Image (cartoon, rainbow, N blue to C red):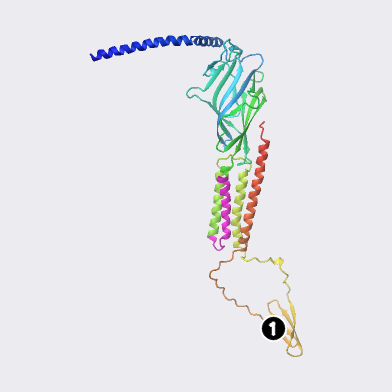
């Protein structure tokens, strides 16, 4: 009994749903019938245009060149690799051109998400300086085609590409890199295809995100030119991106550690020269650390044949550290008390000196004394009554006892180095900063137009 009841209820519900669906279907058909007819006619028109269409033949074959206008939107920039001299970015590339074979009498354009290269003629646009590129296919191919009634075709696709950038690293890490993206036709010369920027040379590149880890995008410039070779003249579009390097991270990672190592090497000037192991260990440690720092800086850099700005800084800092070690060697081989050089003293090479003295005695007369200093250190005294020969005895010196609570006096070279080394290094830091800041501003003001 229960089974029959359930069967009757299910049959009633199914009948209600069928009636509702039948009525709703009539209502939808009446509303969209005209749109369906228009879409059907447009589809027939497109298929009629593609019937007998040869996609190997360009529009206006044998006539004027096809004008292809281009713009692209940069979604994001990827990593800029100095070692490989390349940069990457993710873009939407958009192209427009006219194909008279797609003219129709409909007022609305026809849109489709498909690869147009499989259906009709498209420009053979390629990137001249791109090393690697790929289309996106998630969840399906990221391509859009729109055909207007007047035969204009709009083709948009998403591309991730890695392009070559010939970098000038003379001012690294205070440099600005100018990286181009060059667009050309692979097979068609200017007699067949001519490329132009959609918004002229001003507004053809849109930047969605300028955020990068180590660079700031300061400017984008576009150029239109032609490349001529043995195969003919080819239209070329060029966009140049100006990437200005951020120096904040390099100050904390390179410049501050280098300065700290130099200052640490000056501690040797305050250590007694008798503490040889301590001074040598400190000097060697700072030298090896400086070498390690320079190696880490250039680890991810290309092996260029010229000196970079950071190389000059690290090399000069290393020179100051090494000079501190040389200073200690000089200290060990010089007197701790400064003495005038021999050429600065009076000439004392006379073989003999006579000293005439007149002594007044208690008597009424006087005695004339003549003292002769002989070569062997013997003094001969002569008066009017005869000669007296005297030989001086060496002065007996008592051993010096160290005084309790007193510090040994620093070597005079160490005292001089405590002032000389910091003065020279601070002068170098100021001159280095001013010089390379001026070069950076000059480079930014001139820019770099890549021919």
Q: Position of residue 214 (x, y in %)?
A: 56, 38
Q: Is residue 346 magenta?
A: no
Q: In the rendered view, would you say 281 is above or below 393?
A: above
Q: In the rendered view, would you say 388 is above or below 237?
A: below
**Total number of numbered labels?**
1
Q: Residue furthest right?
A: 365
Q: Position of residue 287 (x, y in %)?
A: 56, 52
Q: Position of residue 211 (x, y in %)?
A: 56, 34
Q: Nearer the viewer, residue 269 or 24?
A: 24
Q: Secondary structure at mark 1?
A: strand
Q: In the rendered view, would you say 185 is above or below 46?
A: below
Q: Is residue 254 magenta?
A: yes
Q: Residue at x 67, y 37 (%)?
A: 445
The quadrant the C terminus occupies is top right
Q: In the rendered view, would you say 337 is above or below 420?
A: below
Q: Is residue 82 visible?
A: no
Side of 408 where 387 appears, left or right: right
Q: Residue at x 65, y 49 (%)?
A: 430
The quadrant the N terminus occupies is top left
Side of 145 where 432 appears, left or right: right
Magenta residues, start to end: 251-277
Mark 1 is surrounded, within 10 Å at the Cα level, by few (under 14), some (14 to 19) or many (20 or more) other residues, namely: few
Q: Is residue 279 visible?
A: yes
Q: Position of residue 439 (x, y in %)?
A: 67, 42
The residue that label 1 is drawn on is: 389
The secondary structure that most of the magenta stretch takes on is: helix
């Amino acid at each position: 009994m229960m089974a029959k009841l359930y069967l009757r209820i299910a049959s009633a519900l199914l009948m209600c749903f069928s009636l509702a669906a039948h009525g709703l279907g009539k209502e939808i058909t009446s509303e969209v019938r005209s749109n369906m007819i228009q879409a059907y006619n447009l589809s027939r028109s497109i298929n009629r245009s593609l019937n007998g269409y040869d996609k190997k033949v360009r529009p206006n074959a044998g006539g004027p060149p096809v004008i292809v206008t281009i713009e692209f939107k940069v979604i994001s920039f990827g990593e800029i690799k100095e070692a490989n001299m390349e940069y990457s970015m993710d873009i939407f590339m958009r192209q427009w051109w006219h194909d008279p074979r797609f003219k129709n009498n409909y007022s609305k354009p026809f849109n489709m998400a498909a690869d147009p290269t499989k259906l009709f003629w498209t420009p053979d646009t390629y990137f001249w300086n791109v090393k690697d590129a790929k289309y996106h296919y998630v969840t399906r191919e990221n391509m859009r085609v729109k055909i207007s009634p007047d035969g204009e075709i709009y083709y948009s696709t998403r591309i991730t590409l890695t392009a070559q950038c010939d970098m000038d690293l003379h001012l690294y890490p205070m440099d600005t890199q100018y990286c181009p993206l060059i667009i050309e036709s692979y097979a068609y010369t200017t007699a067949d295809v001519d490329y132009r920027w959609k918004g002229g040379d001003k507004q053809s590149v849109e930047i969605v995100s300028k955020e990068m880890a180590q660079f700031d995008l300061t400017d984008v410039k576009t150029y239109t030119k032609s490349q001529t070779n043995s195969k003919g003249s080819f239209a070329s579009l060029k966009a140049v991106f100006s990437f200005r390097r951020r120096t904040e991270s390099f100050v904390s990672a390179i410049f501050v550690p280098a300065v700290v190592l130099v200052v640490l090497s000056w501690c040797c000037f305050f250590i007694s020269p008798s503490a040889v192991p301590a001074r040598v260990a400190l000097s060697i440690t700072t030298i090896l650390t400086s070498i390690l720092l320079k190696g880490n800086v250039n680890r991810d850099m290309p092996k260029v044949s010229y000196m970079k700005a950071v190389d000059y800084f690290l090399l000069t800092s290393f020179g100051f550290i090494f000079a501190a070690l040389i200073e200690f060697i000089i200290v060990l081989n010089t007197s701790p008390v400064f003495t005038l050089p021999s050429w600065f003293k009076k000439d004392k090479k006379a073989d003999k000196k006579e000293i005439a003295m007149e002594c007044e005695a208690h008597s009424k007369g006087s005695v004339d004394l003549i003292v002769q200093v002989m070569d062997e250190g013997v003094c001969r005294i002569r008066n009017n009554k005869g000669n007296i020969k005297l030989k001086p005895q060496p002065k007996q010196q008592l051993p010096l006892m160290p005084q309790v609570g007193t510090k040994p006096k620093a070597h005079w070279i160490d005292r001089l180095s405590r002032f000389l080394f910091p003065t020279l290094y601070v002068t170098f830091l100021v001159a280095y900063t001013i010089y390379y800041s001026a070069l950076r501003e000059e480079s930014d003001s001139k820019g770099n137009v890549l021919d």
